[in-house]
Amino acid sequence: MRPVSYVAPKQNWLVRYKLYHIPFWLVYHYVWWATVIGNPVAAATNIFFFTPYAIKYLFYVVFQALAVYFNLYFLIPRLLEKHRLAEYSVCLILTILVAAACIVPGYFLSATLTGRTLNDLYGWDKVNFYSVYTGNPLPSTAASMTLAMSIKLAKNWLQTQRKQQQLEKEKLETELNFLKYQFNPHFLFNTINSIFFLIHKNPDMASASLAKFSELLRYQLYECNDKQILLNKEIACLENSIELERLRQNDNVEVSCQIDPLPCEDLGIAPFMLMTFVENAFKHVSKDTDSPNWIRIRLQWRGCQMDFTVSNSISRDHRSTKFTDVVRYGGIGLKNVQRRLDLIYPGQYDLDIRQEETRFDIRLRLQLTELMVPMSAVQTA
């Protein structure tokens, strides 16, 4: 018995260590230098033939790249993305000032190695640390940081847009597949017929079942259009769906459902995230006449981490199913929910799908957060 595993493809070592950025910085600083002196040929000659000017050029490449990556991969994730704007602004300014200061020794080192003065080497009348510092290193470093941030923000925006489009597509497919199963004539007629026969046999149960059926339809049609909904709504719909499924199942299918109280009433979740697993269990539960048929549903909590387990017995026809066909056996719904988990909860979930000889198990561990509910919605409710 083994869980379904997903192995990410290995990245090329150039991509993994971002070595492809090196040509970018070399070209960028060459263009900057050629623009400043107004002679692209002279700039290229000074770089490629390792003149004293090439030392200054390497100082620009190294220290501005370090400043840029420190900003992109440390300051932005640690400060800006956590809305600590004042701290980020101060650290960004200090990073620019320090990086520019580290470039200045490149000028003096290039002059020292050639035995010449900065005045002879660069043709400056007044040469000191401050004049060199404010001449090119400071504005150049600020420009490099601005360019890198612009590229990074544009890239993040495009990735967010693509992710949002893919998420909307996956959500729509999941809803359509779920509604196709729930609203097909077989489900509707069986449920209505079951309620109809209960009217004479047990009117109270028929009334309660009809209310559950109405709530389920209302939830699927009107209440699950948002990206995130309150978890208690998803659970209420889950319970209604289970009760209605019990009416449709034969008496030899035992259904148990244990749901622990929520640790927080404001926890949110993506709609149809849990119901897909339950729908899969009812769809594929065994229908044997000489052995137990069962479905077990369990929802537990560790703080705000949800531990959701759905298990069902497997009929003889599926006991020979190969492990590689486990997800395929689960149907399109499981594939969709896996993609939605990757999109909505990256790094926040653990999905374990197992098939044994007589059972099919799905276990989802998911870290949830509180959902900010608008006051208008609370007052309307």
Image: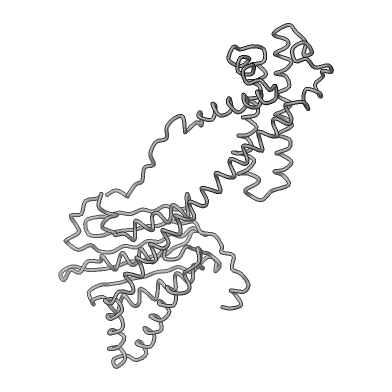
- Measured as percent of width and height from the top left, residue 21 is found at 54, 30
User: Which residue is rendered at x = 51% and y = 28% of the image?
Assistant: 19
Q: Is residue 180 above or below residue 329?
A: below
User: Which residue is rendered at x = 65% and y = 46% of the image?
Assistant: 80
User: Which residue is rendered at x = 29% and y = 68% of the image?
Assistant: 282
Question: Within the image, what quadrant is residue 139 found in?
Answer: top right
Left or right placement of residue 92 versus residue 331 in this view: right
Question: Within the image, what quadrant is residue 283 found in?
Answer: bottom left
- Measured as percent of width and height from the top left, residue 59 is found at 66, 21
Question: Within the image, what quadrant is residue 90 found in?
Answer: top right
Left or right placement of residue 186 versus residue 240 in this view: left
- Measured as percent of width and height from the top left, residue 4 is found at 32, 49
The one of 157 and 79 positioned closer to us in this rendering: 157
Q: Identify the residue at the far left of this view.
A: 290
- Measured as percent of width and height from the top left, residue 153 is found at 59, 44
The one of 94 and 368 positioned closer to us in this rendering: 94
